[in-house]
Amino acid sequence: MPLIVSDYSWTQTDSTVFISVPLKGARAERVDFLSTEEYLKVHYPPYLFEAFLSEPVDEDRSTAKVGNGVAVITLPKCSNAFWEHLVITTYDKEKKKEVRERALLKYQERLCSESRSKAEKQQAEKKYALETMMKLEKEERDIILKRKEDEREKTTAELAAWQLRQRETAVGEAKLKLQDQRVRQNKLKAPTEKQEKGCSDGAKVKLDERGNSEAKSQKTPALPPAPRRSANIQVRFTPRVFPTALRESRVPEEEEWLQKQAEARRAGNADVEELKDLREEERNPEWLKDKGDKCFASGDFLGAVNAYNLAIRLHSKIPALHSNRAACHLKLKNLHKAIEDASQALDLLTPAVPANAAARARASVRRGSAFCQLQLYAEGLQDYQAALKLDPHNAALQADTQTIRDILQGSASGTH
């Protein structure tokens, strides 16, 4: 049950009623107001103040202010007159209940109306924003289409002008060529006409003189111009470490790569300094691999591991070194190291091609054997199956794979 507030005060003018309600320490955000033309409620748990007004008020212009521990409600009157009482004097509970329910219903209707108005306003704003955006997009499309059309017309005009210039140039060249041909023909005809004229007049010409005149007539055409003198054009290129042009390169990434390469070279030089006491053949990874293989064949697994270690230190990208060291670790029961070396070998044996199929099968078997010795049969079966795909006709591999399957099936049945 709420506590009814009775220590309120009120004053009035001809047009307005002022009501002061003490909030009794309640915070402003916890105060709830409800006001209609005939009912007023101020609720701040656990206190409740409600007034069944004796005269109607303008609920649309009613206001409330909270401050200094007091809520001041301002109620404009519907008619300018002094009230004798603030609230009705009747004690009829049914009438008060009716007024209260009517006020609550009217308040709910007003809230619904405001909610609908707000939703309609938001919808109208969204519609306006959408229409505005569509209008702007349409204007932008029109601008783009106009630019495209202008560019197309400009390009068409330039192409037409270029074609016209080409035709005019071709016609001019044809005229010059025709004139040149006519000039040559005229030069060839002139000696012949002169010779025929001399013969008609009865002049006697010897055969050798006729031959000389014919030779002279053949030498009459002008000689072609001399070829142009040759010359060299000096072309200089910007010095580049990378083969691509500077405009096509990404300078920050290239500088980072060069820095990493320099660090790698320094690291390699440091290794060489540390290994300078070794003989020349002992710095050859292939020679060290052969030595490790011989140690493994003779049963000297520690010696083989040392040889492979030095070879890997000199060149860590040879898959066979990691795979063979995994075999040594298997013999020495260093099972976790065997798994690590076999995995490294498989990582280096990429991409998967027929040339490295046998090496991948060996590395898979060695890792699978290490898993099985650690009683990780499921992981071991995966590696053996991978090796069997690479070498499906290997009888020993088939038998080992079936043995692992039997162990897994036996353990599974034992758990049931």
Image (cartoon, rainbow, N blue to C red):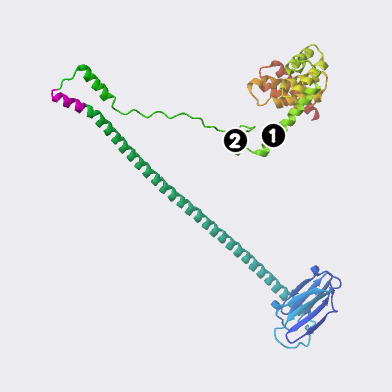
Q: Name the secondary structure under disc 1.
A: helix
> Type of residue at label 1?
Trp
* For marks 2 and 1 on the same chain, the one whose residue lies earlier in the sequence: 2
Residue 38 lies in quadrant: bottom right
Measured in 3D between alpha carbons, the distance from the residue under mark 2 to the one under mark 1, in whole angstroms, is: 17 Å
Residue 30 lies in quadrant: bottom right
Q: Name the secondary structure under disc 2.
A: loop
Residue 194 lies in the magenta stretch: yes
Quarter placement of the C terminus: top right
> Type of residue at label 2?
Ala
Q: Which residues are magenta?
A: 192-202
| Residue located at (63% from left, 64% from top) | 122
Check disc 2 and report the residue beneath it: 245
Residue 146 or residue 327, whichever sits in front: 146
x and y percentages locating residue 128 in the rendered image: 58, 63
Residue 145 or residue 280, whichever sits in front: 280
Check disc 1 and report the residue beneath it: 257
In the displayed image of the protein, which residue is found farthest to the front? Answer: 203
Q: Is residue 192 left or right of residue 113?
A: left
